[in-house]
Image (cartoon, rainbow, N blue to C red):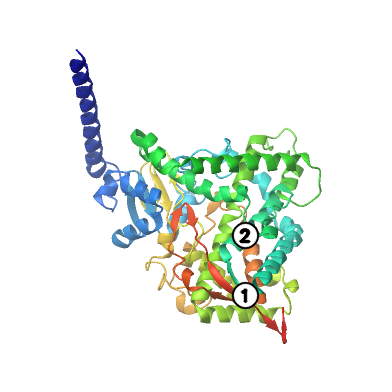
Amino acid sequence: MASVYFSSTAATAAGTLLLQLLYLLGSFIYNVYFHPLRNYPGPKLSAGTKFPYAWARIRGEVPAHVAALHARYGPVVRVSPRELSYITAEAWRDIYGHKIGGRGGLEKDLSFYGPDTVGSNSIIRTNDTDHARQRRLLAHAFSDRALRDQEPLIQRYVDLLSEKMGEIAKTADATLDMVRYLNCCTFDIMGDLAFGEPLGLLEKSDYTPWVAAVFGTIKTNNIRNTITLNFPLFSTLLKKIFVTENMKERNRIHAQHSIERVDRRLARKTERPDIWGFVLRHQHGADPKANMSMTLPEMHANGSTLMIAGTETTATLLSGLTYHLLLNPPVYAKLTNEIRSAFCHPDKMNMSALASLPYLCACIEEALRIYPPVPVGLPRVVPPGGRIVCGKHVPGGTSVMVSQWAAYHSPLNFHEPDKFIPERWLEDRFTREEKTLLQPFSFGPRNCLGKNLAYHEMRLIAANVLWRFDLQLREESRDWVRQKVYTLWEKPRLMCKVVPREVGGLVD
């Protein structure tokens, strides 16, 4: 009797497996030969199944994977059955811009982002209607007026960064990890702006458990969401393999600390020009009956988002800028000469003065191009009825995106794209390049709200460091740029020797 039962069970399992295999085969044939996207260029394996693109996401290899496809197939490529990747300036306008004449105005593909870490929808993950409401409130904290009010606070942490680097410079080895120190600085700045209290990272020259958890949260969410979205039949098994208990714990720590810090800031009465001060001041707008408020769960979610989007990306750009400057001594010398000639001392540096340095601005733009902090595509969904993208009708339900790293490293768009050449942003000989393609803060109504703050931080930190110190890249970091990507770069240590600059015979 038992043998009959087990034989029946085995037969049922075999039948189920056969049906699944037939379904997968049928889906593959349909996707390749009958799907509405069948005429778009790309490899048949990518057109037929999600596996190649999803596997590249899990392995942290999406930028290189997509760039290779574009190199073979051109400016638009089908990277999975329902996803198209573009690398043209026109695609930015048609996908991310305002809706004009059947183009633009596409909603975010929220399946790419997954659920928010703290259980509500932040400004990044929410729908367009809620996004507009949250953005109106948060925009006050990132206005020009707010930035001027916040400048002394930012300067204080930049001075502390210089002080800590100076202490390292006095040691026998005089070597430090620039990634760690830059992260400490940007997290300290945003921690103070977002929560009204210092995190103390630069003071200790080390990460707190919360900040360490932030890095793990980014990777965990990327892998977990990729598995859930692309391999639902095997998601339980794959998550056990790729999502460890330690990774889950880091997510929990990040969510807990974000909630606690927001609650403490809201309970504190202060006139400091931090982010929640501006939000609370404009919570109901001119019309008390208008729905202009932000709920407490949304504040928690946005607190979590600010600690990622407002810190990691800025430190990433500064790390990439440092690396490429040190790999290119003539560029490094030209930039340091511009900065040191413009200011007799760093305390003379301010927003307007730094923004007027052409070579500094060009170096930052080139760093954003060659090493964009968000190197992957951020997908949008074509609505029912379809939409025109780059002159061609794209059917509804398609996920479309501009893949930044692939776009910026394509010879279709830039001359010698893999070389760090700041002059391309200044000299006429590069006029044929597609300069408007560079949109590292995204484009349109959902572009990065903190763009001006990020630029000021980048210029202020870079100028202070390069005015005060001479840097040398250590040999162990020469291949630093070879990194995995889980939406953001997974950066290893960037080891540099730091030497105080001699000013008028004195050491600064």
Q: Is 75 displayed left or right of 253 in the figure?
A: left
Comparing labels 2 and 1, the label whose residue is closer to the camera: 1
Gap in angstroms between the C-alphas marked 2 and 1: 34 Å
Q: How many marks?
A: 2
Which quarter of the rendering shows the N terminus?
top left
Q: Circle 2 sits in a helix, a strand or a loop, which is it?
A: helix
Confirm whether residue 88 shows in the render.
no
Confirm whether residue 508 shows in the render.
yes
Point out which mark residue 455 bears: none
Crowding near the residue tagged with mark 2, few <14, some 14–19, many ≥20 C-alpha atoms within 10 Å: many
Q: Give the percent coordinates (x, y) of residue 423.
A: 51, 77
Q: Give the percent coordinates (x, y) of residue 33.
A: 22, 43
Query: Dividing the picture into quarters, in which one does residue 144 lie?
Result: bottom right
Which quarter of the rendering shows the C terminus?
bottom right
Whether 431 is drawn above or below 226: the answer is below
Quick one: 461 or 434, which is closer to the camera?
A: 461
Point 50% across, 59% down: residue = 491
- Mark sitting earlier along the chain (2/1): 1
User: Dot 1 corresponds to which residue?
Assistant: 172
Whether 175 is drawn above or below 333: the answer is above
Q: Circle 1 sits in a helix, a strand or a loop, which is it?
A: loop
- The amino acid sitting under disc 1 is Ala
Crowding near the residue tagged with mark 1, few <14, some 14–19, many ≥20 C-alpha atoms within 10 Å: few
Quick one: 387 or 44, which is closer to the camera?
A: 44
Quick one: 222 or 506, which is closer to the camera?
A: 506
User: Dot 2 corresponds to which residue?
Assistant: 454
Q: Is 174 displayed left or right of 16 in the figure?
A: right
Q: Is 483 displayed left or right of 286 in the figure?
A: left
Q: Give the percent coordinates (x, y) of residue 70.
A: 34, 59
Q: Give the percent coordinates (x, y) of residue 460.
A: 66, 67
